[in-house]
Image (spheres, grey):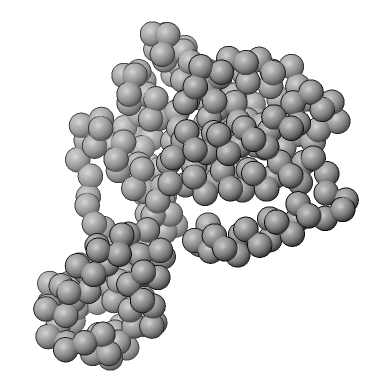
């Protein structure tokens, strides 16, 4: 989740290499990798990655009721024509009784109903899924973002209020990639969004120089000694975008170098 992909791979490889690693352990390793793609909203890649793990457990009667069963059915429904098979399997499996999986199944059913032109049915499934995950707000936001995209694309329900609420939560919690997806979906729905908004307040002295909240985010990371590439990884920005932010910071503050920016940032931390 912090972008340390090398560290993630080392830990997952160590888990899978254990002599006593169960099929669930191997599947969980693929699920974690799938989550990385899901955070970037690369749904086809996330689905393919999760498929490679979950299919090991299909037909394995003693398989644990992992929460990823539901995500597996939801992603398949969103990106392929094999969604019905996954939903039918989950309905008949013990894992399908778990609330998190029931909710994901309801989100998947909402997508299928919306594509079939059954708007009221789709909206009812979406509401049922939201209710099932009332106690797990982060997982609800991540899963329903998939269903809300379908609502925007297939023109059913009223996805805008949910997208705005989730965008606010993603921004509050510094979930930059998920926030970007929510903004993209709002724009696709024809709704205005705030662009380039950072995660923190702008101190008065910097605001007087015309520095934005996003530029403050960059400034504080530069002041901490991060390179442009590292700043980009932390804020989910391209290196070129970070370079542009740094150039504007130098111009607005009159600092001669990154060292000057570090000095400037000192009183604001």
Residue 60 versus residue 69: which sits nearer the camera?
60
Q: Which residue sits at x=41%, y=13%?
A: 115
Residue 228 versus residue 208: which sits nearer the camera?
228
Residue 219 image offset from top left, x and y in percent: 29, 76
Q: Is residue 186 above or below residue 105?
A: below
Q: Is residue 229 above or below residue 180?
A: below
Q: Is residue 216 above or below residue 174?
A: below
Q: Which residue sits at x=86%, y=30%?
A: 62
Instruction: Inspect this view and state whether residue 46 appears.
Output: yes
Q: Is residue 131 above or below residue 201?
A: above
Instruction: Inspect this view and state whether residue 213 appears.
Output: no
Residue 40 versus residue 148: which sits nearer the camera?
40
- Left or right of 265 in this view: 192: left
Tally of numbered tags: 0
- Left or right of 107 in this view: 225: left
Residue 182 image offset from top left, x and y in percent: 35, 41
- Quadrant of res 70: top right
Residue 151 versus residue 81: which sits nearer the camera?
81
Residue 26 image offset from top left, x and y in percent: 74, 44
Q: Which residue sits at x=82%, y=55%?
A: 18
- Left or right of 218 in this view: 3: right
Q: Which residue sits at x=47%, y=25%?
A: 78
Query: The C terminus appears in which quarter of the rendering?
Result: bottom left
Residue 94 image offset from top left, x and y in percent: 78, 25
- Quadrant of res 161: top left
């Amino acid at each position: 989740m912090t972008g340390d992909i090398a560290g993630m791979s080392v830990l997952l490889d160590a888990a899978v290499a254990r002599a006593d690693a169960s099929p669930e352990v191997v599947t969980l390793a693929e699920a974690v990798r799938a989550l990385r793609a899901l955070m970037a909203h690369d749904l086809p890649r996330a689905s393919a990655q999760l498929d490679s793990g979950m299919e090991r457990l299909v037909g394995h009667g003693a398989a644990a009721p992992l929460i990823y069963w539901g995500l597996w059915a939801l992603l398949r429904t969103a990106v392929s024509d094999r969604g019905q098979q996954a939903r039918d399997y989950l309905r008949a499996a013990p894992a399908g009784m778990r609330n998190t999986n029931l909710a994901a199944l309801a989100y998947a059913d909402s997508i299928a109903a919306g594509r079939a032109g059954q708007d009221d049915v789709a909206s009812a499934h979406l509401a049922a899924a939201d209710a099932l995950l009332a106690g797990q707000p982060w997982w609800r936001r991540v899963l329903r973002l998939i269903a809300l995209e379908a609502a925007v694309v297939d023109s059913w329900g009223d996805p805008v209020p949910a997208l705005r609420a989730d965008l606010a939560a993603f921004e509050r919690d510094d979930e930059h990639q998920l926030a970007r997806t929510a903004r993209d979906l709002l724009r696709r729905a024809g709704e205005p969004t705030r662009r380039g908004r950072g995660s923190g307040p702008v101190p008065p002295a910097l605001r007087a120089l015309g520095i934005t909240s996003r530029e403050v985010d960059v400034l504080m990371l530069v002041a901490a000694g991060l390179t442009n590439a590292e700043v980009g990884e932390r804020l989910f920005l391209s290196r070129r975008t970070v370079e542009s932010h740094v150039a504007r910071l130098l111009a607005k503050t009159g600092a001669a170098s990154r060292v000057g920016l570090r000095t400037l940032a000192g009183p604001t931390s």
